[in-house]
Amino acid sequence: MLKRKVHRIDKAGNLNSLQLKEETLDSPSKNEVTIQVKAVGLNFADVFAITGLYSATPKSSFIPGLEFSGEIITLGDNVKGFKLGDKVMGVTRFGAYATHINIQTDYIRLIPKSWSYLDGASFVVQALTAYYALVPLGAIEKNQTVLIHSAAGGVGILANRIAKKWNAFTIGTIGDSSKEELLRREHYDVSIVRTTNFKNDLKKILGEKELHLVLECIGGKIFQDSYDLLSSGGRLITYGSANFTPKSSSPNYFNVALNYLTRPLLDPLDMTTQNKGVFGFNLIWLYEKHELLGRYLDDLLKLEIDAQIIGKVFPFDNAIEAIQFFQSGKSVGKILLEV
């Protein structure tokens, strides 16, 4: 058996309960490979899982983390299409905060030749989130207008690049004016700093344009304002609620309850009258649909999106520090742990 280091939490609820431990890893099953992990990508789902606010969080002890990159060091007996030494990136239903991992080959792909391990660990989850929102659910068409919230974050950056493949007019929202230059470099058409005047700001930018698609991950009033300005036939795709994100090591349950009680409530009759649609998804469900996940990932790689912007890299042992930085809202691009 192989010795490995992991970040494990025995009971979700407090970030400080995340502990660095040494464990043994069994040999891979016949359809699995063992990967020596080189980098781990952080996602909002990690924060919600660790703090106990994620419905998919395991009830018992678990290792957080949804994506990784690394080198194949052992092959299961039935594995085909991969060889020892292959550099791969992959997705897992938890377990990525580890120096070694066993995983079925359905969930890994070769890292593009020009990419580093950090690039590989920055891509799969956020790119799949952006692709799934825009293409299967959003049914994006040429020259549409797309509003992308948290535009300087990992999903937002990749969503804009994907939308530009359809020549979309993209509007990116950010919480801090310091991120406007990044959006210009990423070829967003317009940026909005989210304030209490967000709805009026968006109205002015739209002018006579129709708003066809919204990628929404903030929640609360931002969700409602975005939905209100959707044109007839428009779709709002929601994949998160950043307003619930804990800013400290454990949730403020008063704020959680307040945000829950004041969340937007949509009337189906109004939706029918206005001809608007809302799709909500959690990418974790796609893990069980491995054939569909693989197809989407292959279609995504065919788009030849550039490697993700890497915002900051932390040593593997410093997971808590990395998550705290991620919670701060100061990050851009992808935050990573490097083994």
Image: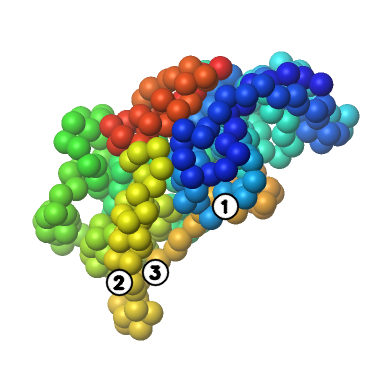
Query: Dot 1: within a 10 Å radius of its alpha carbon, few (fewer than 14), some, or many (20 or more) residues?
Result: some
Q: Which amino acid does the dot numbered 1 rest on? A: Ala
Give the residue at x 71% y 40%: 106
In the picture, the quarter occupied by the C terminus is top right
Q: CA distance from mark 2 to mark 3?
A: 9 Å
User: Which mark is first along the chain, 1 or 2?
Assistant: 1
User: Could you tell me how far apart the alpha carbons at marks 2 and 1 are, in whole angstroms?
Assistant: 34 Å
Which residue in the protein does label 2 denote? Answer: 232
Q: Write the residue at 40% across / 66% down.
A: 278
Residue 38 or 137: which is nearer the viewer? 38
Q: Which residue is mark 3?
A: 277
Dividing the picture into quadrants, the one containing residue 259 is bottom left
Mark with earlier residue (2, 3): 2
Horizontal side, residue 168 vs residue 70: left or right = left
Q: Amino acid at mark 2?
A: Ser
Q: Please give the name of the residue rendered at 33% of the width and 72% of the height, measured from the top-left corner.
A: 265
- For the image shown, how many numbered marks are present on the structure? 3
* Three-letter amino acid code of the residue under disc 3: Gly
Task: Give how far across and how far down residue 294 sits, in percent.
Answer: 64, 44
Specify whether 93 is left or right of 204: right
Query: Marks 1/3: CA distance?
Result: 25 Å
Q: Secondary structure at mark 2?
A: loop
Pointer 1 residue: 56
Q: Quadrant of the N terminus?
A: top right
Q: Mark 1 or 3, which is nearer the eye?
A: 1
x and y, in percent, of residue 272 in the image: 36, 80
